[in-house]
Image (spheres, rainbow, N blue to C red):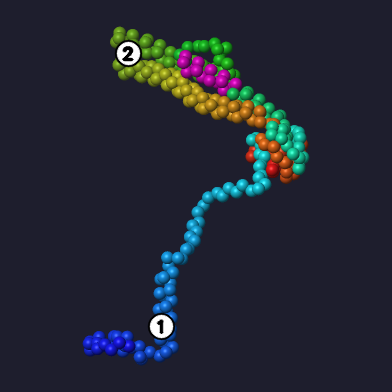
Amino acid sequence: MNNKIFPVEIIDFTSELWLPQLKIKSLIIYNSILAFILTVLLLLPFIRVDISIKSGGIVRVRPITEKYEVKPLNAGSISQIYVYDGMKVLKGQTLLILDRESNKSKLSENELSLQEHLHYDEDLKLLISIDLKSEIPLNQLVSPLFKQQFSKFRYSFLEQQAIFEKAQSNYEMNKKLFDQKVIALKEFRDYNFEFNKAKAALQAFVEQQRSIWQEEKTNNTLALTRLKAEQNELEKDWGQTEIMALISRTFQQFTGKYEGGQIQKGETICHKRL
């Protein structure tokens, strides 16, 4: 221990005063902890820690034996099967054929509905463009629906027109009497009111019917757009009833499929492996 003389103020805090008072066991523990801390500090530059972060995602693994799934693009009934489990198939080879009858039925129904709405569109264009106060031959209309609607409209229109013509006749006759001072002003005003009322009712009836047909035309246009899209989809499905191999592979796990059985769109029907 160095021979140093410390000031009285700090001598109580020096190691020279406290170390002789420590027991040997305590001194050993103190030195061990100090040595451990120094060792850790010296080794820090050489320590490597692996950090892992969890994150959502998809890991695609390409195994030694790759597997490909066969899925139909549309649903249907299996008409014919040309493969069996474990069979080696070539690219472009027909695997199975779906029954076209269900698609054919849907295609026919859609074609009829499309044709019907095209007739509606033709009739509605005519009904909106003409003067509804005039008569038109029913043979100018194509669809039975709007032939019936127009006949019903004309019947109601003629009733309204008869009421108007009667009110008009009374008005014109009593106007002459009023001009000749045969009837009083109050009585003439009553005839004038009935005439204007019948005229407005007839005009409102015609405009209301025109508005109804205009709305029907808008709805029919939307229906035509939908039916044309469905028609294109059905025609595309019609050509996709034959399921073929896109690559040359071994046909595996083809179970539970038989002629006459049903398969769904996107259903896995088999696997093909290298």
Q: Which span of residues is magenta-colored?
A: 115-130
Q: Main secondary structure of the magenta part?
A: helix
Contact, mark 1 vs mark 2 (Cβ under 8 Å): no
Residue type highlighted by circle 2: Ile
Quadrant position of the C terminus in the picture? top right
Task: Identify the element where label 1 is drawn.
Answer: helix
Q: Magenta span has 122?
A: yes
Sequence-wise, the earlier of marks 1 and 2 is 1
At a point 43% along the width and 15% down the height, the residue shown is 164
Residue 47: which disc? none
At a point 32% along the width and 88% down the height, the residue shown is 1
Instruction: Write down the residue under mark 2.
Output: 183
Instruction: Write down the residue under mark 1.
Output: 30
At a point 35% along the width and 88% down the height, the residue shown is 19
- Please provide percent x and percent y for residue 99: 72, 32
Looking at the image, is 65 positioned above or below residue 112?
Answer: below
- Please provide percent x and percent y for residue 218: 49, 25
